[in-house]
Image (cartoon, rainbow, N blue to C red):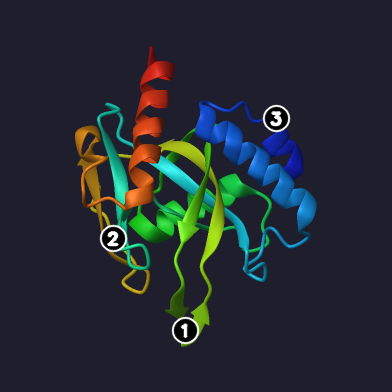
Amino acid sequence: MNIKEKIENYIPFNEQEERDKEQFLKFIDTFDDVLTRDNTFGHFSASAFVVNKERTKMVVVYHIINEGWIYPGGHADGEEDFLSVAVREVEEETGLKATVIDSNIFSIQSTPVKGHIKHGKYVSAHLHLDVLYIMEADDKIPLVYREDESKGVKWIPFDEATDETMCDFIRPIHEKLIKKLNMESK
């Protein structure tokens, strides 16, 4: 299944996802290079909502560019297998070998990236069209992080997922992820 089919088949959870799904599909129809950083307007990223076995905590990474905590994830960089990208990003950003709970897309969202310097070059502000999967990991395993991308990684209880240390734009997304998980667990 190609990227457009994956997005077309995704059933939005709320109004934000309905609007973002429309945006994702229009973006795919407008641009040829939606999977690479060559597209300066935006590109796809793959992320993970990593929870502990008890479903009471989640992993967050302190993102240097966005200056706040956010779930782990990264650029598709030409790869259409978003689940593989998400699994790899979790391991690279946290040191965890997370178990995929469901291989279907768990959530979608457009997230902003502000202009910044990377490897000595300016990168214009753009969007990440983010495809997120749900995974589980042992919250007793020590976490590690990449100092070139982040200032830390930690487990947080769900009630801290929307506090002021999170990236501004990510608070309602964290809230949505937790709500969706709780609804599906019942």
x, y percentage for residue 109? 52, 43
Is 180 above or below relative to 134?
Answer: above
Query: Pointer 3: what residue?
Result: 9
Is 111 above or below relative to 183?
Answer: below
User: How far is mark 2 from mark 1, CA to CA?
Assistant: 22 Å
Q: Mark 2 and mark 3 in contact? Answer it, CB < 8 Å.
A: no
Query: Pointer 1: what residue?
Result: 119
Q: How many marks?
A: 3
Q: Amino acid at mark 2?
A: Val
Q: Secondary structure at mark 1?
A: loop
* Mark 1 or 3, nearer chain start: 3
Q: Nearer the viewer, residue 142 or 158?
A: 158
In the rendered image, the quadrant that contains the N terminus is: top right
Q: Which residue is depicted at the point 48% across and 52% down?
A: 111
x, y percentage for residue 106? 52, 33
Query: Pointer 2: what residue?
Result: 144
Q: Quadrant of residue 59?
A: top left
x, y percentage for residue 2? 76, 44
Q: Amino acid at mark 1?
A: His
